[in-house]
Image (cartoon, rainbow, N blue to C red):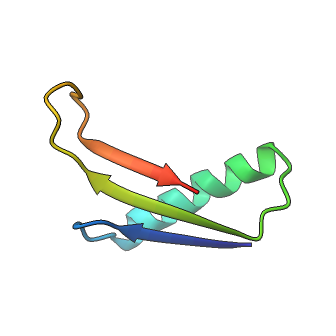
């Protein structure tokens, strides 16, 4: 299984990459999915309606 972690207009540190890989890996194991590859995209968004600007998309 391949987990690709990238950032949109933000750097992805080794610690952040490791954390994302660990959490996504655990989630995939929990649902017992036969996943070949997973892509994680991290970014921040300025939205007055959303008090938490950090977003993570997993596909």
Rendered residue at 69%/47% (across/down): 27
Q: Position of residue 50 (x, y in %)?
A: 24, 28
**If the image is split into quadrants, where does the N terminus sit?**
bottom right
Q: Position of residue 30 (x, y in %)?
A: 79, 43
In which quadrant of the rendered view does residue 48 lie?
top left
- Residue 21 sits above or below residue 11 on the image: above
In the image, residue 43 lies at what x, y percent? Answer: 30, 56
Label total for image: 0
Give the residue drawn at x 50%, y 61%.
40
Q: Position of residue 28 (x, y in %)?
A: 74, 52
Q: Is residue 59 left or right of residue 28?
A: left
Outermost residue, top direction?
49
Left or right position of 15 against 34:
left
Position of 31 compared to 17: left or right? right
Residue 32 drawn above or below residue 20: above
What residue is shown at x 78% (from left), y 63% (from top)? 35
| Picture quadrant where residue 16 is located | bottom left
């Amino acid at each position: 299984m391949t987990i690709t972690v990238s950032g949109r207009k933000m750097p992805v540190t080794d610690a952040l990459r490791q954390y994302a890989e660990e959490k996504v890996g655990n989630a995939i194991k929990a649902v017992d999915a036969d996943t070949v590859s997973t892509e994680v995209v991290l970014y921040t968004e300025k939205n007055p309606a959303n008090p938490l600007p950090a977003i993570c998309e997993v596909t």
